[in-house]
Image (tube, rainbow, N blue to C red):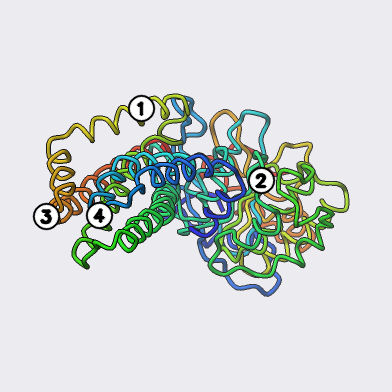
Amino acid sequence: MLGCRQQGSPPNRLRFMRRTKGRRQPEMVVELCSAEVRVGDHLIVSEANLVCGSGEVVAIRGPNGSGKTSMLRTLAGLLRPRLGTHTGPASCAYVPAAFDPPGIAAGRWLRHFPRHHRVDPTRALELLEFRGDLTQGCDALSFGNLRKLVLAEALSSGEPLILIDEAGMGLDAPGIRSLQALIHETADAGVCVVVSGQDSQFMPEFTKMVVLRNQRLALVLPGQLEGELRLRGDIDKLEQVRALAHSLGLVEPPT
Amino acid sequence: MIRFQFWLLMATTRWVGPVLFLLLWVSVTLSPPPPPLEEAAFLFPVAILVTIWLTVIVGGLDDKPHRELVAAAAGGPVRLHLLRATASMLVVGPATVVVVLVVGMVSGEASVGSLAASAGLVMAAVLIGVGIGNVLHPPIVTEIGLAVGLAPILLALIMLLPPIQAVLRMSNNGSIWGAVAVLPAATAFAATLLTTGSYIVARRSK
């Protein structure tokens, strides 16, 4: 859902937007309320309202330089909004698009990476078809394998919030399919997963999608949801969603 | 988190320089082995320098995206900054304390009081070093050249302070009271600089 509780927006009315397969109502995991985000003097986004709940997969899209990474860093608590508020968990898993790999052995990096409730990452590594040598330094891994290592770490972190920048970057086709499956499996376990990417890139099936354009956050209603509502004949709900989106100042039309 | 920082540090060879420097200094001062308080006074400036060096190394072990990856897990940039300072202190502190204790045993002139005072004196140096070092690495100082230039200047300023001179004179004369006085002052100094460093890191993330 888009909008924040402090402004009196009614998040509960949008509950049916997520994939509801007998799951409980999501609890708020991270929230931006009237946030203005800047990097230095450069305005990234203003008046951003976003609430991400447990079990949701949120996709952030936008062209190069639109501020997707800065939005993820803000949600992770690494970049504080100049105005407005950010509310989120004490710690989270954040996967940057790329980093200079340290010389530490990949297995040691994975084993000693500080997490309170780590789940065994072996399965995630296998599903992502990690082909690197864990005894070698991270700097000896290929870009794709390093990416799979970090993704496996994040998806087995046990954190309530996982943020993945440029989700499909560096992955081969099987890796992308596995990542998509893993993301949904993780979300089904109650974790909030936020991914960013460009329009042309891989995106997992999302609960909601926000688009960054012209320093504004806009919600795009999932096409699948609209299709489902039409199929079920819930035209009233569809109209409610549209009306609510319009009242919240969302400029993107439903797809 | 501290164990992770330790493994990151061990995976590089950057720790070799300060460790060799410390060992060289200790070996020079050990012939013949002085009383532990005197050794601690000799070790005082070196312990500060080595701690600054290691704190800067630990703080600059990775690039910004990897630091953010770790910071998200640690609970934010400020918390990571403080944890890295703690990691540096936990590496250098015990090492320098062991050095003065071993010297005390070897010299055969050690009493419990002088050993404790010696340990306190080098721990004071380590605290001062951590305090200075924490404001000389990313994201506060991102240019390594600037950190290298500032570190000896700040060390010289500390060593020229009259209270520090007095403490070292007292320690050289075998009095434990200088060490007793300098430890709380060094703790307050380190706390002030760590707070300042944390404030700057918090501002930088805005």
Residue A207, percent across and down?
67, 56
Secondary structure type for disc 2 = loop
The three-letter code of the residue at mark 3 reads Trp
> Nearer the N terminus, badge 4 or badge 3?
4
Residue receiving disc 4: B35
The three-letter code of the residue at mark 1 reads Leu
Secondary structure type for disc 3 = helix
Number of labels in the image equals 4
Q: Nearer the viewer, residue B63 or A57?
A: B63
- CA separation in Å, label 4 and label 3: 16 Å
* Camera-nearest label, 2 or 3: 3
Label placed on residue A103: 2
Q: Is residue A154 left or right of residue B191?
A: right
**Vertically, is B19 above or below B149?**
below
Residue receiving disc 3: B177
User: Chain ID for label 3?
Assistant: B
Q: Which of B128 and A50 is in front in this view?
A: B128
User: Chain ID for label 1?
Assistant: B
- CA separation in Å, label 2 and label 1: 28 Å
Q: What residue do we see at 69% from left, 53% from top?
A: A105
* Camera-nearest label, 4 or 1: 4
> Nearer the N terminus, badge 3 or badge 1?
1
> Nearer the N terminus, badge 4 or badge 1?
4
Residue receiving disc 1: B150
Residue A250, percent across and down?
57, 40
Badge 1: residue crowd in 10 Å (few <14, some 14–19, many ≥20):
some
Label placed on residue B123: none
* Camera-nearest label, 3 or 1: 3
User: Chain ID for label 2?
Assistant: A
Quadrant including the N terminus of chain A: bottom right
User: Badges 2 and 4: C-beta atoms under 8 Å apart?
Assistant: no
